[in-house]
Amino acid sequence: MVPNRTTTLATSTIDPNSCNSNPCQNDAICYGGKEGMYKCLCRAGYTGSACETKLSACYSAPCKNGAQCSGFDSFTCQCTNGFEGRDCGIKSCPSNPCLNGGTCSDLGSSFVCICPMLTSGTLCEERLPTCSSNPCQYGGTCTGDLDSYQCRCRSGITGINCETNIDDCASVVCQNGGSCVDEIEQYYCKCMVGFLGSFCETDIDECASTPCNNRDSGATCLDLAGRFKCVCAMNYTGNTCTFDPGSVAAAAELIAPGAPLEKISELSKSNNTVGTGALLADAVPFLAANMAEEIRKNMSWGYADAFQWVTYEENELNIPEKFVMWNDPLLGNCFTFNHMNKTERFTLHRIGAKYGIRARLKLNLREYVSWSTTAGYRIFIHDPNEAVFMESISFEASPGYLTSIAVKKSIVKRLKNPYGECTMSDGENTDYFFEGVYTKEGCIRTCYQKELRKQCGCMDPRYKTSSDDQLCGIDKRTCIEEFNAKNSDYQKWPGCVCNTPCSITNFDASLCRTSFRNQPSECNNTNSTVADKCLENYEKETVMMEVYFISLATVYREEIPSFTFADLLANLGGITGVLYGLSVVTVIECMWILFEITFTFISGRYVGQ
């Protein structure tokens, strides 16, 4: 059934398509049936086989409590004694005690007054001030008495009830395609990309940061609306003139049919960005590792690209002087504080966040490849004399957050032969490739390179090698992948013995990440559009980090032998003494007797002669 509809089944003989002639009247819904039958679904208030008859307003018996209903199009109820209201649903109060136009409702043994606006009390006897209903909008101030009120509007607002915000944009013209946004007694121009200023009158110079001259000093930058364009010199090409034609030609050779990266062309044609990115990410270390380290450093971010400032124990540091920049084919440029090659070492004096190392780092997202899914910095906390590997424990510092790392130091010392198996230092392994003290990871990488050399005739360029060994090119990538798939267990490599170091320095760390709380001073602009854009860039391209100790104490864990050689001798002597009655005095006396016998024998022999 459909609400507010009356259903009538008609059996009149009509066309086979019963509803085509619209037999149902007064906006009724027609449903066709078999053998010429149809059905009309009437609107409320209508009846009949074709919904042709209009029902009286009293048809639904709207009057309550025995009241008489009259009327056709609308109804009127004649209430019985004690009831009132349009449908006689309210009990009346004979004495009508409610004041100020209040309506009395009889509850049987009591009554209640339903008060109109601006009245209150049991009998609606209290008249409220006209301002009690807060008629003034937009923060206007209301003054008045019981009968009238007046709104005093704040500046920029008008109207009897302060309901109208005066259009401050009426006489404002925002330039360069900007649009005016009206606020209360103020406005601002929402500028198009590439413009700023109170009226969007200033064209942002996208060439100010010299984006075209990172490598090509002869390039010319053209400042366009919201963007820039580089006109490169003859020896460079690319959006920012960072590629030389030779590199482009070499790249074309790598993706040619039959070349090591021929799959890139196929993936690009199918718009497989993920597959292309994965293949390039795997290939780039091979290409970069065969370059000189100095060239790799220049291609990656330097001190000025990565850092805005660094402090240690609340003192700002000279970054190039206190940090060592080095390059790893997998990690890129790395910056190490308290590096093993630095003669000056910073020592720990105080604990707590503000006394550790704190830094504000930059991210230039424009330089990230399009398929990148993450951006940030990796933080490695390690002993100054240990090398860092791609697989070393690290922490991710993401843009828009302060990454806090609390550290505790511990040292573990193990016993070597004959009590256990550990390696004292790199001196025990003359073929160890890595700088610094011996680590198990470095030993495994050294074994890996030696074993790979047997299989592929070269060493993996992504890891440290000996100075006289040949590095594998991109054409050997398949050989390396096959070797890694078949030789995952280093313990099965001939001659590879990689014990745990006898002394390990650990840094037990806990991480906390919080959103930025304070707005940077450079974003304090009166123009809200400029300030919002600045803040957006700040949160997207700024990384804050701090690493600090929570204790000055170092926890030592050291193995000691449970039974030494001295213990063996002591126990052996004690047991022998118990069994044979031997002691030190007995042994001395026996030795003295033997001496005297020998001396007497020799002396007597000479006397006899």
Image: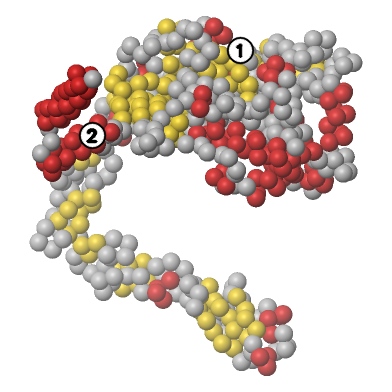
Q: Please state which amino acid type lies under the numbered disc 1.
A: Ala
Q: Quadrant of residue 369?
A: top right
Residue 333 lies, with reference to residue 270, above or below; the image says above
Q: Residue at x 59, y 88 (%)?
A: 10
Instruction: Give the percent coordinates (x, y) of residue 418.
Output: 37, 36
Q: Does 282 sit left or right of 118 as displayed?
A: right
Instruction: Give the percent coordinates (x, y) of residue 198.
Output: 61, 13
Q: Residue at x 42, y 7 (%)?
A: 315
Instruction: Give the percent coordinates (x, y) of residue 563.
Output: 26, 37
The answer to which of 484 and 553 lies nearer the viewer is 484
Q: Nearer the viewer, mark 2 or mark 1?
A: 2
Is residue 139 visible to the viewer in this orientation of the structure?
yes
Q: Quadrant of residue 600?
A: top left
Q: According to the image, label 1 marks what residue?
A: 304
Q: Residue at x 71, y 40 (%)?
A: 454
Tell me the SS state at disc 2: helix
Tell me the SS state at disc 1: helix
Q: According to the image, label 2 marks what residue?
A: 569
Residue 470 lies, with reference to residue 35, above or below; the image says above
Specify which label sits upstream in the sequence, 2 or 1: 1
Give the residue at the far front of this rendering: 609
Q: CA distance from mark 2 to mark 1?
A: 66 Å
Residue 70 lies, with reference to residue 283, above or below; the image says below
Instruction: Give the percent coordinates (x, y) of residue 98.
Output: 18, 48
Q: Quadrant of the C terminus?
A: top left
Is residue 273 visible to the viewer in this orientation of the structure?
no
